[in-house]
Image (tube, helix red, strand yellow):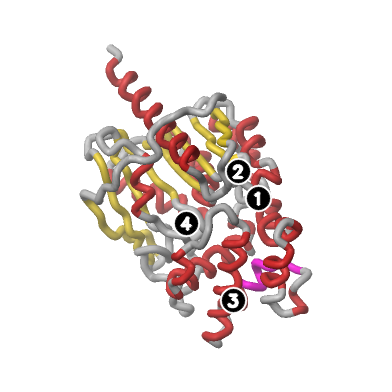
Amino acid sequence: MAEPTARVRYPEIEPYQHGMLAVGDGNRVYWETCGNPAGKPALVLHGGPGSGCRPGMRRYFDPDAYRIVLFDQRNCGRSTPHASDPAVSLAANTASDLVADIERLREHLGIAQWLVFGWSWGSALALAYAEQHTDRVSEAVLTGVGSARRAEVELFTRGLGELFPAAWRQFRDGVPASRRDGSLAAAYRDLLGDPDPAVREKAAQDWCAWEEAMLPMSGHNPRYDDPRFRLAFTRIVTHYWSNDHFLHPDGVLLAEASQLGSVPARLIQGTLDLTNLVGTPWLLAAAWPGSDLVLIDDAGHGGSDRLLSAIAAATDFFAAASAGRERRP
């Protein structure tokens, strides 16, 4: 499919409504709505797991056409309790918990159907939600496409070491020698739970340094300079990566994508995204009859201006298509 063209992103906007939603197990998730209260509903799912939402994520949608909903997934961002406190348990933070939270939020906001947008882990969570609640998803826009397979975690924690050997050796050597041949995600998870704050802090720094090394086109991520963000993010991502994202059997999201049938979707992927090495975007496009795969030549996993333009073009297209349906007699 030819690459669409559009503005890079819409102007900055502020929420017109926000709140904290109790979702059980003592968790409260932060949510906000932006744009047009009477517009087409759209849900934004952030990556990580554990990255939290940022203001720029509001800007992928025309604020005159969309009612844009964002929320911070459990234990990160503005949600509570926060994973930066090592005493906070993550036992009630699983993929099924997050899918249930999305449904609670939809019901809380009185939304019948919404477009679901996800980047990276957010794309996998969008798939999990859409496959369980297909009737609630009007369309999907996914980028930095992931399916939460074991092969993807192996690529991130070991496979890319062949491309970035020095950075990977430093990452591997951050765990005890006895654990370097096993799951590095599990080894880091345990270090991040160590009673010694210095051990936790070094593990968080080492993990974030490797995260940054895997995205050489994106430059320095200033959020990694924040100790509170750093510990929460690394605790949550290693919690998920060391447990197969709590999705079983391995590959279930791809295996069940065919049930999405004709639900329209744009899969927007940079050709320089290193996650492409395990083929996820093409496998998902082949499994999902209603999807179109859009390839952006100059973009990696962190995106580019052309990739951001393609996202805006996709959301513009779905808004126009929806408006056209509504006008029909």
Q: State the residue position of label 1.
A: 149
Q: State the residue position of label 4.
A: 97
The amino acid at mark 1 is Arg
Q: State the residue position of label 2.
A: 253
Q: Nearer the viewer, mark 3 or mark 2?
A: 3
- Dot 2 falls on a residue whose secondary structure is helix
> Between marks 1 and 4, how big is the CA–CA gap?
18 Å
Return the mark for residue 203.
3
Residue drawn at x 29%, y 21% as measured from the top left: 326
Asked if the residues shown at circle 1 and circle 2 are in contact, with their CB atoms under 8 angstroms apart, the answer is yes
- Indicate the quadrant containing the C terminus: top left, top right, bottom left or bottom right: top left
- Dot 1 falls on a residue whose secondary structure is loop
For marks 3 and 2, the one nearer the N-term is 3
For marks 1 and 2, the one nearer the N-term is 1
Q: Position of residue 270 (x, y in %)?
A: 58, 41
Residue drawn at x 68%, y 67% as measured from the top left: 167
**Residue 87 is covered by the magenta coloring:** no
Q: Position of residue 100 (x, y in %)?
A: 43, 51
Region rendered in magenta: 182-188
The amino acid at mark 4 is Asp
The crowd level at tag 3 (other Cα within 10 Å; few <14, some 14-19, many 20+) is many
Q: Nearer the viewer, mark 4 or mark 2?
A: 2
Asked if the residues shown at circle 3 and circle 2 are in contact, with their CB atoms under 8 angstroms apart, the answer is no
In this view of the protein, which residue sits in the foreground, 245 or 215? 215
Magenta stretch secondary structure, dominant: helix
Return the mark for residue 194.
none
> Between marks 1 and 3, how big is the CA–CA gap?
24 Å
Asked if the residues shown at circle 1 and circle 4 are in contact, with their CB atoms under 8 angstroms apart, the answer is no
